[in-house]
Amino acid sequence: MSAKITNIKPKRSRPNRAPAPDLDRIAQGVRLILEGIGEDPQREGLRDTPKRVAEMYAELTAGLREDASAHVVPLAGDKHDEMVIVKDISIASLCEHHLAPFVGKCHIAYIPKNGNILGVSKLARLAEAFARRLQLQERLTSEIANTLFTQLQPLGVMVVIEAEHTCMTLRGVKKSGALTVTSAVLGGFRKDPRTRAEAMALITGKTS
Ligand SMILES: [Zn+2]
């Protein structure tokens, strides 16, 4: 098992809102792929495949047509100001280099300001809105962190994603189970190495 740790600097996220997916066009492309690999798109098992794949890609890129920041709605009237950590949010995304899935877990830590916290389901939706599009794991990590940081305005944010990229594990070097680990650290977590270490230990379940 190998782990690559990349630390990402803050960047502005791309604007949202792509047009509605053109299912016929995706299906046409899938038919070409089938022909290209020497299959017969008319044989029984493949007849509905282009349509099914088109629907799957529409679903896996639904985040393109969503405003991710709309999920960051603070819970009213809470006074919590200790570090919040939500671990093991499942994510499934598509690598933009191969259109192959990468799947894994997203962990989000933040230090609230003025008691502003976010429900766990909202954090999961935020992660999903950015995962459901063509992505790079590094960008996915920083987009989640940046949006949480600018919308919720906490004292600090840390996002860690561990994922297996099928474009790596199913082909080439075939390192089955190899995980890529990325993190994005903003605000107080960035300035204070002790707080960062504490959050990282809680996330990974290890103490240094
Ligand atoms: Zn890839």
Image (spheres, rainbow, N blue to C red):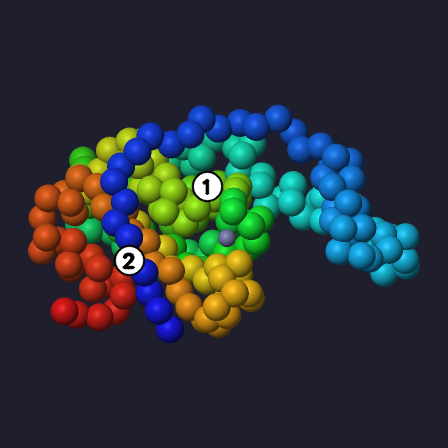
Q: Nearer the viewer, residue 140 or 71?
A: 140
The three-letter code of the residue at mark 2 reads Ile
Q: Secondary structure at mark 1?
A: helix
* Residue at the image position 65 percent from the left and 41 percent from the top: 58
Label 2 crowd (10 A; few <14 / some 14-19 / many >=20):
some
Q: Is residue 200 visible?
A: yes
Which residue bears the numbered disc 1? 130
* Residue at the image position 10 percent from the left and 53 percent from the top: 193
* 149 is higher (above) or lower (below) than 160: above
Residue 85: mark: none
**Residue 113 occupies which quadrant of the picture?**
top left
Image location (x, y in percent) of residue 196: 16, 53
Label 1 crowd (10 A; few <14 / some 14-19 / many >=20):
many
- Left or right, 185 with respect to 23, comes to left
Image location (x, y in percent) of residue 169: 50, 66
* 181 is higher (above) or lower (below) than 75: below
**Residue 51 occupies which quadrant of the picture?**
top right
* Residue at the image position 50 percent from the left and 56 percent from the top: 102
Which residue bears the numbered disc 2? 5
